Image: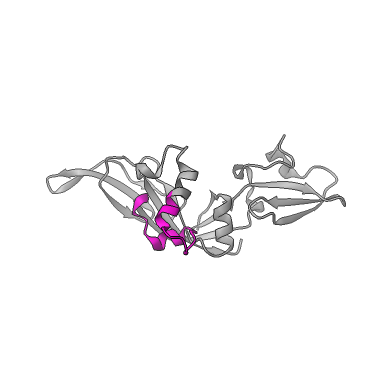
């Protein structure tokens, strides 16, 4: 069983904590825009283009899902900071909901401070969250390859969207663009994605 880090936004963290989010979609790096079909096996995908006779022309070698395969686990990295109580006790603070985790009393700066030089008591990027500080561990229960616009209403709910929304796919498209548009993968481009199903397990 592999253990891989995955970064989540604050809304996603809250949805996981509430039990509303059981899927995450991630862009498949290296997926050709001209692909019109795929083959998948054990967390891998191969893209094909227009048919050449009766056989689709392969456009890529097998691309492995960087998050693992079914049965593997993910530990979630999120934005955080530190807070020192008047008593001198140090706390790690999860920014999504303000939850605190005691680090005890340290006569010298905690070793984790080496990850956030110059950022003490400021929001720290989830990239710098160490494994021990993660409060969420997820087990992969399924992986599907699809284009992001193929998302169903059921999948939008699994992505953490409010089931009472008038248009779940529209709500998800806004959520997607808030995270991916500036990275060059807008909803309008309809990128290929890994749709990763998961369940929350003990850290």
Does residue 75 show up? Answer: no
Q: Is residue 153 magenta?
A: yes
Nearest to the observer: residue 85 or residue 65: 85
- Residue farthest to the left, as pictured: 53
Q: Residue at x 37, y 56 (%)?
A: 151
| Residue at figure coordinates x 71%, y 51% from the top left | 93
State the residue lying farthest toward the right. Answer: 87
**Would residue 124 be found to the left or right of residue 11 on screen?**
right
- Look at the image and give the residue range highlighted in magenta: 148-173
* x then y, percent, for residue 147: 34, 50
User: Residue 108 in the image: x percent, y percent?
Assistant: 83, 43
Q: Residue furthest top?
A: 118
Residue 178 shown left or right of residue 192 in the figure: right
Q: Is residue 162 visible?
A: yes
Which residue is at the front of the view, 135 or 23? 23
Residue 59 sits above or below residue 69 on the image: above
Residue 184 located within the stretch drawn in magenta? no
In this image, 195 relative to 10: left or right? left
Quadrant for residue 34, please give it.
top left
Residue at 32% from the left image edge and 54% from the top image edge: 40
Q: Give the percent coordinates (x, y) of residue 31.
A: 34, 42
């Amino acid at each position: 069983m592999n253990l891989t880090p995955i970064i989540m936004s604050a809304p996603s963290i809250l949805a996981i904590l509430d039990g509303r989010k059981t899927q995450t979609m991630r862009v498949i790096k290296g997926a050709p825009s001209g692909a019109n079909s795929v083959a998948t096996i054990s967390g891998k995908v191969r893209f094909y283009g227009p048919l050449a006779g009766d056989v689709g022309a392969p456009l890529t070698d097998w691309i492995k899902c960087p998050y693992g395969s079914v049965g593997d686990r993910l530990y979630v990295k999120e934005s955080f900071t530190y807070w020192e109580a008047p008593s001198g006790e140090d706390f790690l603070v999860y920014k999504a909901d303000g939850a605190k985790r005691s680090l005890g009393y340290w006569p010298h700066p905690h070793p984790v401070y080496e990850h956030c030089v110059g950022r003490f008591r400021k929001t720290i990027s989830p990239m710098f969250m160490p494994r021990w500080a993660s409060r969420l561990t997820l087990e992969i229960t399924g992986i599907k390859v699809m284009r992001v616009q193929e998302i169903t209403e059921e999948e939008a709910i699994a992505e953490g969207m409010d089931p009472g929304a008038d248009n779940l796919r529209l709500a998800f498209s806004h959520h997607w663009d808030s995270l991916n548009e500036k990275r060059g993968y807008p909803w309008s481009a309809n990128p290929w994605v890994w749709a990763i199903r998961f369940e929350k397990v003990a850290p």
